[in-house]
Amino acid sequence: MSALPLAGASVDYARDIQPIFAEHCLECHGPDDSKGGLTLTSREQALKALESGAHGIVPGKPEQSEVVARVTSDDPDEQMPPPKHRAKKPITQRETELLRQWIAEGAKYELHWAYKPVVKPAVPKFDHPVDSFVRTRLAAEGLKPSPEADRITLIRRVHYDLLGLPPTPEEVDSFVADKSPAAYESMLDQALASPHFGERWGRHWLDMARYADSDGYEKDRPRPDAWRYRDWVIRAINNDLPFDQFTIEQLAGDLLPNPTPEQIVATAFNRQTLTNTEGGTDQEQFRIEACMDRTETVGAVWLGLTVGCARCHTHKYDQITHREYFQLFAYFNNGDEVVRQAPVSPEEWSRYEKANGASTRKLIPLQKALDEARTHVPETLPQWEPAIQTRLKQARENQAIAAFAPVKITTVKSKAGSTFKILDDGSVLASGKQANSDRYTLEIQATDQPVYAIQIQALAHDTLPGKGPGRSPSGNFVLSEVSLSSAGKVWLLHSPSADFEQSSFKATATIDGKPDTGWAVKGKLGKSSTLTIQLAEPIPPKHKITLHLDQNYGRNDHNLGCFRVLASSVETEDSIAPAAVVKILDEEPRRRNPVVIQALYDWMEKTDPRVIAAASALKAAQDKLPAPPLMDVRVLAQRKDSRQTHILYRGDFLQPTNKVVPATLDVLPKKKAANGTRLDLAKWLVSRDNPLTSRVTVNHIWGKLFGEGLVKTSADFGVRGDRPTHPELLDWLAADFMDQKWSRKTLIKNIMMSDTYRQQSRDREEASAKDPKNELLWKQNRLRVEAEIMRDLGLATSGLLAPKVGGPSVFPPMPADVAALSYANNFKWTTSPGEDRYRRGLYTFFKRTSPYPDLTTFDCPDSNVANVKRTVSNTPLQALTTLNAQPYNESAQALARRVLQEEYTTDAERLTRAFRLCVSRIPAPHELNALSELLKEARYHYQSSAEEAKTSVGAYTVKDIPDSETAAWIATTRILLNMDEFITRE
């Protein structure tokens, strides 16, 4: 609706003039460019003398103001905006008159409406606050609201909006029959209490969080732990976690005092950024890109501002400078991407605690201590690396090659009671008793040289079955674990390799810490084989060595029969570190891939004293308990050693300029920040003094319930964005949202209880003529459901839907050629079995480079950046998808089977039942007749096409009913599932 003043009314700077400047003037006369000496972003600058000596604006005197002279000039050399700009969108006569009137009235600059404090306005006369503001505005425009929708429409509207699922016919009947005044509110409360509410509204938030199950960029590796954050969101929304706390935990949960595991998991919000794992990339560039994404996401989601425009230069329209962008950026610059252990779910952890008693409570603080120790490891890399690089350089210069020689074994003992004979060549021959689990303990005489690597030779011997080298009837053995100690210390072993290994019993299993794995040699029985293991640090000369050989195959005949031990006193490149670590060390530090470099950090952790101590304490506690339900989760952690943040010229990470410290936008009220951390930023965002967060959030929620926000430009509350259609209503809701302790459910219920929400969605000619876009809210809007909900509706109606809430992402049926589009065919889409095939669309694995096609067909965002408002398109491909794609076809098959298996017997009864399952109401006579005719035609077709009928029915056969009959019903239910009324929220 037009916001221009009426004749005789005063001009409002924020409403009338600022948009004109933004549209036509600020490109040349803004904060970064002041051509002719004119800057129009503040009154002080605008009143200054120009280079010509004239004044752009002279308050009260438009005839002396150069701005007016230029916009009214006929001289092409004098005209403003210049003709080349006017061709794009010329300044209008009305805009020129507004400028003239504004200057005549004193050229007052006012604060933009969105930056003004949120003050709760008085409510007009109507009962409900929402209705009061809406109907007052309607009355002023000579319009009336629409009547309330019928009860069937209301319950469907509520279920679609809150749950994304259709009500059952039984739920509809119950609501329609309930004549009490509280019936609607009771139905609303039940929907808000449903666990599916968190799924529906969690999906809205995941759009803004740019959630996906893969990294993005070329390789687009999977993120197997991403779903853990999605579950946190669903749980938080179901529990109505206050939005201020919801904000704080996601942006800075790790910085709260004694954060819980769930508060740490919440910071995975910050890890939904893209991660580039391509070789040769400059990783500092992509670390900075991730911090920029976090900065701009905060701007879009909480502030409703296009903060990203200031990445390269001061914002051309809004009051956000280039410096301020990097002041916001600084809050995230000291966060490091880390992996933490967290419970698989709070429920799983609760069950684990209950089953294993109070001792389990020690695990979480011990895990936190280990995580804290690991946090320091990347910071020690500059001190740790030089010594390793020196050793590598020396080994390469010497072209060192390991030289193994037998060591002298002084004693051998068996835990299970085997006997041993040390032979003349230094080898050991076992005999006597065997057991399911045994440990050979070898004492080795000190050598005159350091030991950098050891070899264990499994030797053939004539006395062993099949000549060995093991004691099983076939001659095999399984060496489960190898460990080595000396001088009271357990030495770190790495990089085991063998000259031969059985396909499922690899050499690497000998140091994996898993007793049920190991090295074996089937395929080379009766011959000798050698296992080589490297030491991270050499054992000094003159030190006795104890070697443990564990054999836990579970059969009492798979122990080593004859073996010998050798040692090398030469330090080689292989002995210094694992090959994957050496490869990382050979790369230029700034090009070390953030995913691959984790192997380096993992290696450093194995030698870090703090990590070793913390890991030992945790393991000691865990060894007394069953394995806890823990998993790795990617989160954000604050650095101990702060980075210095610089302004980056043109946003280029290679061009740092002036230093900055964390700070918020000058145009908004400040909140004192003691340390300048993400926690300070989060608290500022949800402080009562911040005028944007509550307004922006209320607008997001309103938009989900009406299809359009009170501010249509949901991502832009700045100068170029739309003004609110109902500013007082927006402020009342924003203030009340804070008054109600930021309760999302309370806000949603308050809006949905209004008559405005409950209106019919039918068009009215007289109202549409005045307000074709329904900005005045004289009716409710009709909305096609989102991509995920399209399939959910079919699954629910057909009875296929698996109602499980939460858990890992799933893989519904998808054409094979879509997955093949991934980089180097590195991703296989294997359809999930059982109930996971029929989970809600929310849980579908989302791969950024090849998303599930049905989601993108119906406008699901790409998850590369925060999305606060989905687009809605209407294309032929969408109809083809719902008519033909396998997931939708399955719903039609299952719905047909459902109505054929239920107690109904006549066509009319079954058609009515199917119709009600889809759209809740009873079909009109003409609709029932049309469906009957369709069913009749389908029967005629399939009765003469037996093979086609069989193909159509597939696995959805119905006992005692011919496939031709079932296929005819499938053809009919497919049409029901494609009705506009089915996929539209009325």
Image (cartoon, rainbow, N blue to C red):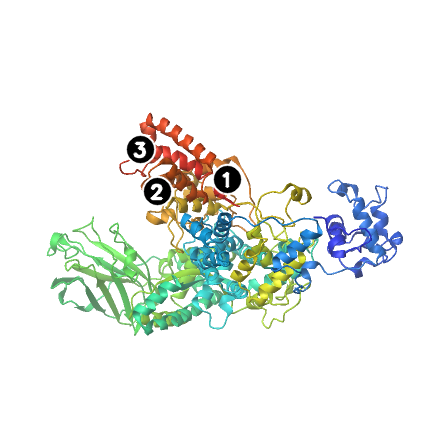
Q: Tell me, for residue 980, which label it has, or none.
A: 1
Res. 692 visible in picture: no
Q: Position of residue 340 (x, y in %)?
A: 42, 63
Residue holding disc 3:
963
- Residue type at mark 2 is Arg
Q: Earlier in the sequence, mark 3 or mark 1?
A: 3
Q: Secondary structure at mark 3?
A: helix
Q: Quadrant of residue 679?
A: bottom right
Q: Are marks 2 and 1 in contact (CB under 8 Å)?
A: no
In-front residue for pair 976/170: 170
**Residue 712 visible somewhere in the drawing:** yes
Horizontal side, residue 530 vs residue 767: left or right:
left
Q: Secondary structure at mark 1?
A: helix
Q: In the image shown, does 311 or 566 lie closer to the viewer? A: 311
Image x and y of residue 382, in percent: 49, 65
Find the distance from the CA under tag 2 to the CA under tag 1: 22 Å
Residue lying furthest front: 179
